[in-house]
Amino acid sequence: MLVLILGVLFSSFLGAQTAPSFQVRADLVKVPVSVFDSEGRVLTGLTRQDFVLLDENEPRLIENFILDRTPLHVLLLLDVSGSLKEELAEIKETAYQFALAFDPEDQMAVVSFSEGLQVLQGWTRDRNSLRHSLKDLQRGYRTALYDALEFASLDTLAPVSGKKIIILFTDGLDNQSLSRFETVLDLLLQSDISLYIVSRTRLVRPRIEKSDRIEFLNQVMKNILGEDEDFLAAYFQDKENSLSHLAEVTGGRIFFPEKLADLRNSYMEVAQELKTQYLLTFRPPTASREDFRTIQVMSTEEVGRIQHRKQYHWVESYSE
């Protein structure tokens, strides 16, 4: 409730700111899995026998298993709301460096958004065309983040097949969307989209905290509720938690750079991760009380971390 109140109070201020041969039957669920050692390095030498998969806590037989090097469809989704001129330049360069990190056979597209959205580049393998499209980035004001993710899921990525990835650059401070968090999460899961997020919340927060208006509103909230809590901190934490949940459940990751330059060492890391994922498939139950079922992948070997999507969309066709 406190976060909702803060969201209303802050909204006007924030607004100003070569493939392997591998066929999967329609009745099987695909689960991309990334495995890392204790130092955070990708592990690629595991076999089917090294994994255990649970569906709603019930063990499932892993029907197929490969190291998946399938070409990717990667959408760069760029939040330009409230961006300063120098920040726009950094967003352009960061997005382009991400594009260069992927393989030549991977297709990429670019969409920017603020209160509305603009398709800057349709699907292409031409990195020069992609870089040229980034020159058209223009600063916006308000942030329709969830609307942009809904568009990306339904319009940009729905028509394509194979591995579908969104790399989202955003301040995370949605203040314009008609779509909602739950709707977007469902769409991402239904479309088998993995979401990777570069969150600018920690970049924009110092600027917001210095605003006399925000400092005044924070003090008003403390006086009204008789508490000494930093409500601005609670507001930002809620936004970061929501973004983290979207990334984690879809099998992606989130980064919180203190400055965008901090991310430059991560370009190849993310691209390598997406090119060295295992693909596991399993047969879901023929009946389900839940539309979205929870899965868990574990390794019988000692590993540092396993990353995979945490849910899948159960459909009636599984019962046929």
Image (cartoon, rainbow, N blue to C red):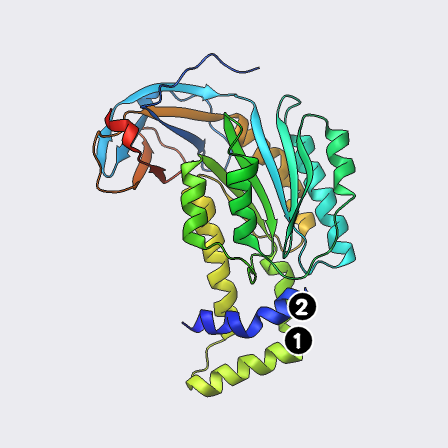
Q: Which mark is residue 275?
A: none
- Label 1 secondary element: loop
Q: Is residue 298 left or right of residue 218?
A: left
Q: Is residue 135 left or right of residue 275?
A: right
Q: Residue drawn 62% across and 27% down?
A: 107
Q: Nearer the viewer, residue 50 or 275?
A: 275
Q: In the rendered image, which quarter is residue 172 located in?
A: bottom right
Q: Nearer the viewer, residue 251 or 36?
A: 251
Q: Are marks 1 and 2 in contact (CB under 8 Å)?
A: yes
According to the picture, the residue beneath numbered tag 1 turns out to be 211
Using the image, determine if residue 5 lies above or below residue 82: below
Using the image, determine if residue 73 lies above or below residue 229: above
Instruction: Identify the amino acid type marked 1.
Output: Ser
Q: Residue drawn 44% across and 39% down?
A: 251
Residue 234 visible, this angle:
yes
> x%, y% of residue 59?
22, 30
According to the picture, the residue beneath numbered tag 2 turns out to be 207
Q: Residue drawn 21% across and 29% down?
A: 286
Q: CA distance from mark 1 to mark 2?
A: 7 Å
Q: Is residue 154 left or right of residue 302?
A: right
Q: Is residue 149 left or right of residue 258?
A: left
* Mark 2 surroundings: few (<14), some (14-19) or many (≥20) residues within 10 A: few
> x%, y% of residue 124?
67, 28
Residue 306 visible, this angle:
no
Using the image, determine if residue 17 lies above or below residue 219: above
Q: In the rendered image, which quarter is residue 205 located in?
A: bottom right
On-image quarter of the C terminus = top left
* Mark 1 surroundings: few (<14), some (14-19) or many (≥20) residues within 10 A: few
Q: In the rendered image, which quarter is residue 103 located in?
A: top right
> x%, y% of residue 86?
78, 55
Instruction: Identify the amino acid type marked 2.
Output: Arg
